[in-house]
Amino acid sequence: MARRRFFVDRIDQGLAELRGEEARHLTRVLRVEAGQQFEISDNSTVWLAEIAEARGERVVFRTLAPLAEPALPVHVTLVAALFKFDRFEWMVEKATELGVARIQPVEAARTEKGLFEASAKRIERWRRIAREASQQSRRSRLPEIAAALPLARVFETASGARYFLDEAGAPPLVSVLDRPHAAPAEISLAIGPEGGWTEAERQLASRTGWRPAGLGAGILRAETAAIAALAVAWSVGSTGFG
């Protein structure tokens, strides 16, 4: 059985602390004791570590040895138009499990009124969800959850391989993904809001170098499209990049 993995803020002279709810879970639910081994990550390196101290809301780990971690085959930024927060949170969790490197929420023309302003109060919750999903899926690094921005600003400043997911007759994503020789590849995937993209947004995407791509003949919900697109990118990256 795989060891549990936890993220710590930093490792100082071989020691790292875990506080708050996660520490309480270890001490009060799992009833851990000194000497038990877990894995920890400082968002850079994964370590095999043992518990040096566990009391109440404070757990101290002592690092034992660094652990080798396979490199991700593809570095994906998910540019996601804001939609209802309960479903957006589900998307953050599942996208994290699928290895997304960065989630950039955006306000599109058809983003529901009020979501952009309200997103500032939700970002820390999204980051907690991503942290928990990262530990559960045994990631070595947390995904970046960025503050929401207007769509035009993101489209105009993005670089690298960019794909604009659209149901309007676009070629399949799996057929248009670039397969560069240098790995890991870096790509951006843009997912529209409920109601889809406007024609003006399609024109903006074209002017700023975003290539149209589709996910089949059906019309997917935004969160489903995000997960499907990530799964395609992961599959192609694992077998076709390099």
Image (cartoon, rainbow, N blue to C red):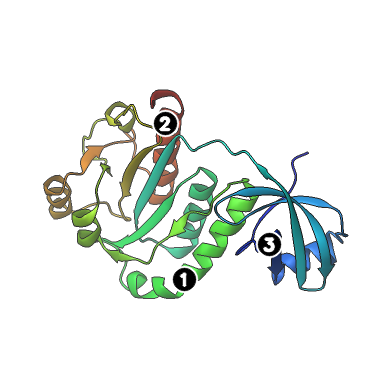
Which comes before the other along the chain, label 3 or label 2? 3
Q: Are there few (<14), some (14-19), or many (20+) residues within 10 Å of tag 1?
A: some
Disc 1 marks which residue? 122
Disc 2 marks which residue? 237
Disc 3 marks which residue? 13
Q: Identify the residue at image location x=30%, y=71%.
A: 113
Whole-percent x, y for residue 205 in the image: 17, 48
Q: Nearer the viewer, residue 20 or 201?
A: 20
Whole-percent x, y for residue 240 in the image: 39, 24
Left or right of 119, for residue 132: right
Tell me the element at label 1.
loop
Tell me the element at label 2.
helix
Question: Which quarter of the rendered picture does the C terminus lie within?
Answer: top left
Quarter residue 236 falls in: top left
Mark yes or no: residue 19 visible. Answer: yes
Residue type at numbered disc 1 = Arg
Residue type at numbered disc 3 = Gln
